[in-house]
Image: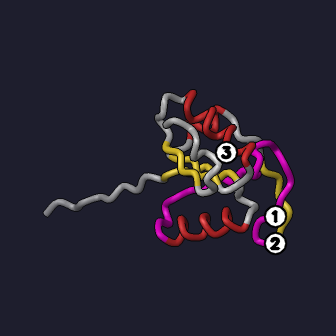
Amino acid sequence: MAKSSRTTKITTVALIGAETLLGREIEEVLKDRNPDVKVHGFAANGEGNFGEQEGEPVYFEPFTAETVRNARAIVVAGAREGAKKAYDLAKANSAATLLFDCTGFLSNEPE
């Protein structure tokens, strides 16, 4: 009898607004539902900034085009500036990355 090997593919999700209450809730839900997901947190505005995770101070790296290429999905839970930056970078990536806007800031964008 052949052994079946289960390969686990880690899914990377870029979370804009990881330091916000909404961002923390989304990260918790993603990790609870799929332990194989890797959530990479970014500041609400998409720029490099200091914040807090699990009661500890952290530095959130800037959200860049490289990040978009490495992520399967982008979840926006931050500020309007971060949402716009995520939208522009995802659009430039030829829509290969899924974009989820949990804020409503992108409701007037055509795609």
Q: Secondary structure at mark 3?
A: helix
Residue at label 1? 52
Q: What residue is drawn where x is 50% and y is 66%?
A: 35
* Circle 3 Cα neighbour tier, 10 Å, few/some/many (<14 / 14–19 / ≥20): many
Percent x, y of residue 64: 69, 35
Residue range corresponding to the magenta coloring = 33-54
Q: Are dots 1 and 2 in contact, CB under 8 Å?
A: yes
Q: Amino acid at mark 3?
A: Ala
In three-dimensional space, the C-alpha distance between marks 1 and 2, rounded to whole angstroms, equals 6 Å
Q: Which mark is residue 106?
A: none
**Viewer-nearest residue: 13 or 79:** 79
Mark 1 or 3: in front is 3
Which quadrant of the figure has residue 51?
A: bottom right
Q: Amino acid at mark 1?
A: Glu
Residue ranking furthest to the left: 1
Residue at label 3? 83
Q: Are dots 3 and 2 in contact, CB under 8 Å?
A: no
In three-dimensional space, the C-alpha distance between marks 1 and 3, rounded to whole angstroms, equals 20 Å
Q: Which mark is residue 55?
A: 2
Mark 3 or 2: in front is 3
In three-dimensional space, the C-alpha distance between marks 3 and 2, rounded to whole angstroms, equals 25 Å
Percent x, y of residue 43: 76, 51
Q: What residue is drawn where x is 58% and y is 51%?
A: 101
Q: Secondary structure at mark 2?
A: loop
